[in-house]
């Protein structure tokens, strides 16, 4: 079930549902600092949908538009991630299984990595991570789960060398540790979302309880069990995770102990129902248009930004909406706004990168600025 439309959600998630009106109250689920996330007891999958009046508009102002590869040979196929670093634009092309490097004007400089089995090649690359002047590529199936490249796109070697065939959605690094948002094993639906690794890739802990909806769907042989996209981010020594079918953000300490769950959803959120497992693409598209999925999470100095998605049946495109909240001891000042094209990254403090497939066949990178609240 990890192919076709459902499989694309492992890479991008999917969906963004109809508008819901509900209470403006905020729900912050607090647990004891020493409660092990992923242990025997899991928090209830409860959340509060904010009312429209509790969420301000999020304005995204375009500050730059860059055509990626003005000549046809330099255009990417399907962009699954993008990163701006050291005056370069790094693009993961999911169709060609490759890492492309462009200059700041969008001219292709080199194909840094292409499909293959050797070191320095890629197979199923899904995420980019910038660490200093180094670009890391997370690959789902390659024997090097994380490959490193310098600011010019030259291969530096494998990171997390003892980790092979990661089967993960994202990775974050902090203080000598790596946090891997893993895909759910079919036979272990209750396994926590985040694996904690040392810098050789050897695991020594877990965190972030998996939403109980996965186990329920697995027992009932439902399709929802396959929507296992998740994301992990770090800030100030704390770890944060999200899951496709569960609105809200879970906060952990560096060892995976659960600190709290910010259990809120934006006004447009629609909860998923479940249907019998299927591979029928028409049924899957219709199903994916009925609920809202959480796609990505980015931490800002004073809060977080979540990407929510929904499949639009009329355009046959995924629609992206950003949900940004200030978060300190309490949740404050949430905003929401639609993104042009495919939203892929937030660069602190306020820059959003989105990719748009234009009508003339070109692919443009939109550099957007989040307006002040």
Image (cartoon, grey):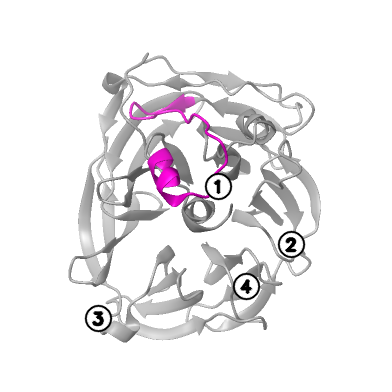
Within the image, what quadrant is residue 85 found in?
bottom left
Q: Which mark is residue 147?
A: 4
Q: CA distance from mark 3 to mark 2?
A: 39 Å
Q: Which mark is residue 199?
A: 2
Crowding near the residue tagged with mark 3, few <14, some 14–19, many ≥20 C-alpha atoms within 10 Å: some
Q: CA distance from mark 1 to mark 2?
A: 23 Å
Within the image, what quadrant is residue 51 found in?
top left
Q: Do tag 2 and tag 4 residues touch (Cβ < 8 Å)?
A: no
Q: Do tag 3 and tag 1 residues touch (Cβ < 8 Å)?
A: no
Decide which of tag 4 and tag 1 comes sooner along the chain.
4
Asked if residue 18 lies left or right of residue 278, the reply is left
Is residue 157 visible in the rendered structure shown here? yes
Q: CA distance from mark 4 to mark 1?
A: 21 Å
State whether residue 240 is above or below residue 350.
above
Query: Which of the two marks, 1 or 2, is nearer to us in this view?
Result: 1
In the displayed orientation, state which residue is furthest to the left.
360
Asked if residue 278 lies left or right of residue 177, the reply is left
Image x and y of residue 251, in percent: 60, 34
Magenta-drawn segment: 264-288
Decide which of tag 3 and tag 1 comes sooner along the chain.
3
Crowding near the residue tagged with mark 2, few <14, some 14–19, many ≥20 C-alpha atoms within 10 Å: some
Q: CA distance from mark 3 to mark 1?
A: 33 Å
Which residue, given by chain and number where applicable, does mark 1 sit on? 229
Q: CA distance from mark 2 to mark 4?
A: 13 Å
Query: Which of the two marks, 3 or 2, is nearer to us in this view?
Result: 3
State whether residue 101 is above or below residue 234.
below
Which residue, given by chain and number where applicable, does mark 3 sit on? 70
């Amino acid at each position: 079930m990890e192919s076709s439309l459902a499989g694309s959600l492992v890479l991008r998630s999917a969906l963004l549902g109809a508008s819901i009106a509900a209470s403006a109250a905020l729900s912050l689920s607090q647990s004891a600092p020493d409660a092990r996330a992923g242990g025997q007891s899991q928090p209830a999958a409860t959340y509060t949908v904010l009312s429209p009046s509790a969420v301000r508009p999020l304005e995204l102002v375009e500050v730059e538009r860059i055509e990626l590869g003005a000549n046809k040979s330099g255009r990417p196929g399907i962009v699954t991630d993008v990163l701006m670093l050291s005056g370069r634009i790094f693009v993961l092309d999911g169709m060609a299984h490759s890492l492309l490097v462009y200059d700041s004007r969008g001219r292709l400089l080199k194909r840094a990595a292409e499909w293959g089995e050797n070191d320095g090649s890629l197979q199923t690359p899904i995420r980019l991570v910038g660490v200093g002047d180094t670009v890391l590529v997370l690959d789902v199936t390659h024997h090097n789960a994380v490959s490193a490249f310098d600011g010019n796109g030259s291969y530096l070697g494998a990171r997390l060398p003892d980790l092979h065939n990661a089967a993960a959605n994202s990775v974050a690094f902090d203080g000598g540790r790596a946090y891997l948002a893993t895909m759910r094993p079919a036979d272990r639906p209750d396994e926590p979302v985040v694996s904690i690794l040392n810098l050789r890739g050897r695991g020594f802990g877990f965190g972030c309880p998996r939403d109980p909806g996965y186990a329920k769907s697995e027992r009932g042989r439902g399709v929802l069990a396959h929507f296992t996209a998740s994301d992990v981010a770090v800030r100030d020594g704390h770890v944060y995770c999200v899951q496709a079918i569960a609105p809200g953000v879970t906060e952990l300490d560096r060892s995976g102990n659960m600190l709290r769950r910010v259990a809120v959803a934006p006004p447009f959120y629609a909860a998923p129902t479940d249907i019998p497992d299927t591979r029928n693409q028409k049924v899957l598209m219709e199903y994916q248009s009925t609920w809202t999925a959480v796609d990505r999470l980015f931490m800002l100095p004073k809060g977080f930004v979540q990407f929510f998605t929904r499949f639009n049946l009329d355009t046959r495109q995924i629609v992206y909406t950003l949900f940004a909240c200030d978060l300190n001891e309490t949740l404050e000042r949430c905003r929401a706004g639609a993104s042009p094209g495919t939203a892929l990254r937030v660069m602190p403090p306020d820059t959003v990168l989105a990719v748009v497939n234009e009508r003339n066949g070109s692919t443009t990178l939109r550099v957007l600025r989040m307006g002040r609240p």
